[in-house]
Image (tube, helix red, strand yellow):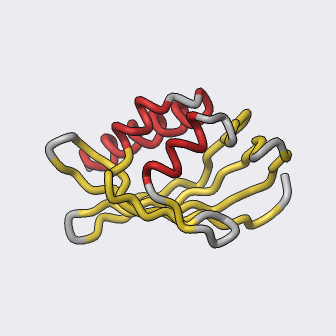
Amino acid sequence: MREAQDILACEEKLRTAMIAGDVETLSELIDDDLVFTGPIGNVMTKEEDLEAHRSRVLCIQRLDLFETAFHPLHGFIVVTTKARLEAMYDQNPVSGTFAYTRIWHQDEHGWRISAGHCSRIGDL
């Protein structure tokens, strides 16, 4: 499936940008109307997500994805994946295994994330 190859490339671009704190690339990959629910239930907008990276409140050192699956759904691609994460958030260490769900849609800018969710599922 061509879409799965495109999304796989986008997922890797996203992962790399998150680790690098590359706000420009993240902005290209995230829809303006993003709704993202974090691991503590906080709901974030695109600007809030970008600001966490821009200000370095969120600094990711390791983000290893595994068990990634693609689920086409009415013009969207739902990606489920797990990740081993090591990061600093607001100067506090964060590490563990997390499950992510991201909903990708294609528009005139290419594939972009319109919604997502992250849940902690275990320790490293």
Residue, x 60% and y 44% (percent of image)? 52
Residue 79 location, x and y as percent?
Answer: 44, 59
Residue, x 64% and y 72% (percent of image)? 41
| Direction from residue 77 to residue 82 in the image, left or right | right
Residue 19 location, x and y as percent?
Answer: 62, 32
User: Of all residues shown, which one is farthest toward the left?
Assistant: 108
| Direction from residue 101 to residue 93 in the image, left or right | right
Residue, x 44% and y 38% (percent of image)? 26
| Direction from residue 32 to residue 92 in the image, left or right | right
Residue 114 location, x and y as percent?
Answer: 35, 59
Residue 99 location, x and y as percent?
Answer: 63, 62
| Direction from residue 103 to residue 89 in the image, left or right | right
Which one is nearer the viewer's eye here, 61 or 65? Answer: 61
Q: Is residue 85 above or below residue 98?
A: above
Q: In this view, does 104 lie above or below 27?
A: below
Residue, x 63% and y 56% (percent of image)? 82
